[in-house]
Image (tube, rainbow, N blue to C red):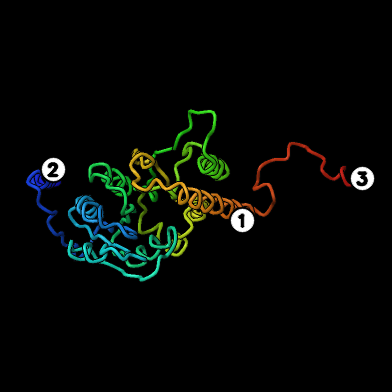
């Protein structure tokens, strides 16, 4: 069914026609959450691909701070649209969309990146196979003399969570998927701070996997250096918040990492 749908879409685009409207499933198995702010150029294609990840899918668009008709396009496409006149800020739209989701599997993507359904489906399959959180295997640029601070922050958090095999995979990056169980145990509101949600999930013993590789760094349509710097500072702050939470949960300032016999108290004797 999915292959036929993809073929039909390619034929439709070749003919120069607009994507056909989708219809949300009455009893969805998968809820695709798409935060959107002024994304009229891509929103229809994002919805079209998202709808094809499973036969019983709902697409939830959280249109926040949009003044370019994004919400109207999403509504015409058949998505369930939650509208806010003001921008909600980074990741808050994911949390709000999750609160409205009815599916057993929640898949998160962004409105400014058109990811083909075939590359989203592995994230859905991973949750169907019993994992609680399916992350993007994308690590960012690591084979260079200067590694981006956000990549280092992601790797450092996963090391702290005793999950070095995840590298820099993170709930900060789309696409990713979570189970209904994970949503209920973490709490939808916490998805507004993805690294902290990841730390909480790890503390609860939820099962992680890297479900697929999508190079969102290359695909992201927004390249503004000003926006990039703001987001970098936000992500770093989010990771510091997550690390602080983990350390406090561990009950000691080294988060259960050994001090290897270091006699700190002798410093006070000098």
Q: Is residue 10 left or right of residue 194?
A: left
Query: Percent x, y for residue 262?
Result: 79, 38
Q: Quadrant of the C terminus?
A: top right
Q: Looking at this view, is 147 or 109 the one in front?
A: 147
> Mark 2 near mark 1, Cβ–Cβ under 8 Å?
no
Q: Is residue 84 above or below residue 4?
A: below
Q: What label sits on residue 3 in the rendered view?
A: 2
User: Where is mark 3, residue-wise?
Assistant: 269
The label number, if any, that marks residue 249 in the structure image: 1
- Marking on residue 193: none
Q: Secondary structure at mark 3?
A: helix
Q: CA distance from mark 1 to mark 3?
A: 30 Å
- Give the secondary structure at mark 1: helix
Regarding mark 2 in the picture, which secondary structure is present there?
A: helix
* Rendered location of residue 48, percent (x, y): 19, 53
Distance, label 2 to label 1, CA atoms, is: 47 Å
How many dots with numbers?
Answer: 3
Q: Position of residue 210 (x, y in %)?
A: 39, 40
Using residue 214 as the reference point, say whether residue 116 is left or right of it.
Answer: left
Mark 2 or 1, closer to the camera: 2
């Amino acid at each position: 069914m999915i292959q036929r749908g993809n073929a039909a879409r390619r034929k439709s685009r070749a003919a120069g026609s607009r994507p056909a409207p989708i219809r949300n499933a009455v009893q969805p198995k998968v809820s695709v959450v798409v935060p959107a702010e002024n994304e009229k150029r891509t929103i229809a294609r994002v919805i079209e691909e998202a709808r094809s990840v499973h036969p019983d899918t709902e697409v939830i668009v959280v249109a926040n701070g949009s003044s370019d008709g994004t919400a109207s396009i999403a509504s015409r496409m058949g998505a369930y649209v939650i509208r806010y006149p003001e921008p909600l800020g980074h990741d808050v739209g994911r949390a709000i969309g999750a609160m409205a989701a009815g599916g057993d599997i929640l898949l998160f993507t962004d409105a400014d990146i058109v990811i083909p359904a075939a590359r989203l489906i592995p994230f859905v399959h991973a949750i169907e196979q019993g994992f609680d959180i399916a992350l993007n295997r994308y690590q960012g640029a690591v084979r260079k003399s200067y590694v981006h601070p956000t990549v280092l922050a992601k790797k450092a958090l996963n090391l702290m969570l005793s999950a070095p095999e995840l590298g820099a995979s993170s709930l900060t990056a789309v696409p990713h998927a979570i189970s209904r169980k994970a949503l209920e145990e973490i709490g939808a509101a916490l998805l507004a701070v993805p690294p902290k949600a990841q730390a909480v999930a790890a503390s609860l013993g939820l099962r992680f996997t890297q479900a697929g590789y999508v190079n969102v760094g290359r695909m992201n349509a927004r390249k503004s250096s000003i926006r990039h710097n703001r987001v970098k500072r936000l992500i770093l702050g989010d990771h510091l918040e997550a690390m602080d939470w983990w350390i406090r949960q561990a009950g000691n300032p080294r988060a259960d990492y050994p001090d290897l016999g270091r006699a700190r108290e002798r410093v006070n004797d000098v």
